[in-house]
Image: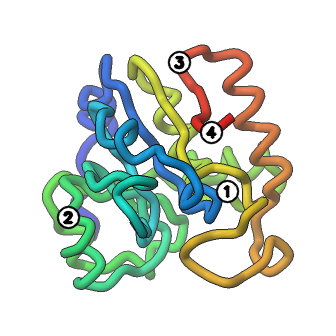
């Protein structure tokens, strides 16, 4: 059984914060966004959170959003204060993650709603964009999101080898940025 904290607690931790959400696009390794990332009030990273250089990716991780297994070595490297399990696949949730301080289990209904809006399973990144934008944060700055144009730093699969619809996710994020001035994308 998961030991999830309440959504209200998560949302209260976001209130009036400047949040940097760091995706895993390879293109981020070509930009100098590390200082901006680390200057945010809260830094959220995704899955195995590659950080090839502090100049490009920064060094801090306050929250880690997971939808995949993660080893102890990666957790020790990342050192998140809070882990959020975003996947609908509950059987993959490691006990050590579920019992960690500040753990949050993303509701299945939220995952299903986003899947239905996209017409495909959402990525961890888009789930976090959706979740964070629903809070009272001051700003959300996206780093390392090119919607798979440059592939991912965490694997070698191509867009046609994963179950996500990156064009739909890009449209979703662009529509959100057009209607919510708190959400912006670095590197554009």
Measured from the top left, where is residue 4 in percent x and y? 26, 55
Front: mark 2 or 1: 2
**In the image, is residue 62 above or below residue 121?**
above
Measured from the top left, where is residue 82 in percent x and y? 24, 53
Residue 122 is labelled as 1
Determine the secondary structure under disc 2.
Answer: loop
**In the image, is residue 154 above or below residue 8?**
below
Mark toward the start of the polypeptide (3 vs 1): 1
Q: Residue at x 52, y 73 (%)?
A: 89
Q: Quadrant of residue 39?
A: top left
Name the residue tied to disc 2.
79
Is residue 8 visible in the rendered image? The answer is: no
Mark toward the start of the polypeptide (3 vs 4): 3
Determine the secondary structure under disc 1.
Answer: loop
Q: Are marks 3 and 1 in contact (CB under 8 Å)?
A: no
Q: Residue at x 42, y 38 (%)?
A: 20
Residue 182 is labelled as 3
In which quadrant will I find the C terminus? top right
- The foreground one among 33 and 173 is 33
Is residue 17 visible in the rendered image? The answer is: yes
Real-space Cα distance between discs 2 and 3? 27 Å
């Amino acid at each position: 059984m998961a030991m999830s904290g309440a959504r209200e607690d998560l949302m209260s931790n976001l209130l009036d914060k400047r949040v940097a959400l760091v995706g895993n696009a390879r293109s981020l390794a070509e930009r100098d966004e590390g200082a901006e990332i680390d200057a945010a009030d809260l830094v959220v990273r995704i899955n195995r959170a590659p950080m090839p250089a502090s100049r490009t990716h920064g060094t801090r991780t306050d929250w880690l959003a997971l939808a995949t297994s993660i080893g102890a070595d990666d957790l020790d490297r990342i050192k998140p204060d809070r882990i959020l399990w975003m996947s609908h696949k509950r059987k993959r949730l490691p006990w050590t993650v579920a019992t960690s301080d500040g753990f949050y289990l993303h509701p299945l209904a939220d995952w299903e709603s986003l899947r239905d809006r996209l017409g495909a399973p959402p990525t961890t990144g888009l789930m976090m964009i959706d979740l964070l934008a629903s809070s009272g944060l001051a700003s959300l700055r996206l780093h390392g999101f090119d919607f798979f144009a440059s592939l991912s730093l965490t694997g070698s699969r191509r867009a046609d080898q994963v179950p996500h619809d990156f064009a739909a996710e890009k449209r979703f994020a662009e529509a959100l940025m057009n209607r919510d001035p708190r959400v912006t994308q670095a590197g554009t």
